[in-house]
Image: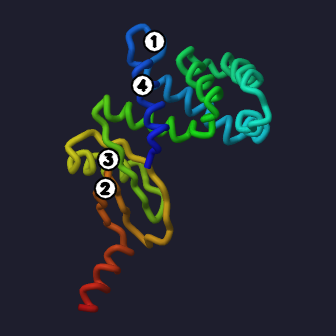
Amino acid sequence: MLSVVASRYARALSDIVFEPGSGVEPHAALGQLRAVEAMLHQSTELRTILLSPAVPPSKKRAVVAQLAEPLGLAKPIRNILYILIDRRRIASLSAIREGFEAVLDEKFGLIRADVTSAGELTDSQRASLQTQLSRLSGKQARLEFSIDPALVGGVIARIGSTVYDGSVRGELNALRTRLAS
């Protein structure tokens, strides 16, 4: 669940990106946020500099300015990073990116479905799942995949608060409940 703060920053960023003449496409902005987020996760030095209260905001801004050109960051993305630095909220970047992604999905009529499977799914299985979940939800589904070997087989799909359990573990639990009663 997104925090109120992350949600507000995500909405503000979407307002800026969707404004005519913003200079950045919404999906390009998302890609740029992901790139910065990936750099933060990969580089302990960068993470230490940007998250440390001992480093002054001006130095943090200088570091972001140096990274902006090689990453090709658009002005709205640079500015949101500067604001996060100034307000000591750069640690919330992942949550803000997640919120921004949710706002984009909403604006483009997509629905997010989290799919957990016992093993890696083939491309045809993924396509079939996307078709079925889109039909069930009435919107185009954007699937996020993860693996949980404890499922034994099958998949579990979550769309919002609705769970579709087609796993062997779920079937065994249902059978256990029926036998116990």
Nearer the camera: disc 3 or disc 2: 2
Gap between marks 3 and 2, in whole Å? 18 Å
Q: How is the image coloured?
A: rainbow
Quadrant where the C terminus sits is: bottom left
| Residue 90, position as x, y percentages in the image | 62, 34
Across and down, in percent, residue 20 comes to 38, 10
At label 3, the amino acid type is Gln
Bin the neighbour count of mark 4 within 10 Å (Cα to Cα): few under 14, some 14-19, many 20 and up.
Answer: many
Alpha carbon of mark 2 to alpha carbon of mark 4: how far? 25 Å
Q: Compute the Cα span from label 1 to label 4.
A: 10 Å
| First in sequence: mark 1 vs mark 4 | 4
Disc 3 residue crowd, few under 14, some 14–19, many 20+, Cα 10 Å: some
Q: Position of residue 177 (x, y in %)?
A: 28, 85
Number of numbered discs visible in the structure rendering: 4
> The disc labelled 4 sits on which kind of residue?
Ser
The numbered disc on residue 161 is 2
Q: Earlier in the sequence, mark 1 or mark 2?
A: 1
What's the mark number on residue 14? 4
| Callout 4 secondary element | helix
The tag earlier along the polypeptide, 4 or 3, is: 4
Look at the numbered disc 1 and give the secondary structure of its residue. Answer: loop
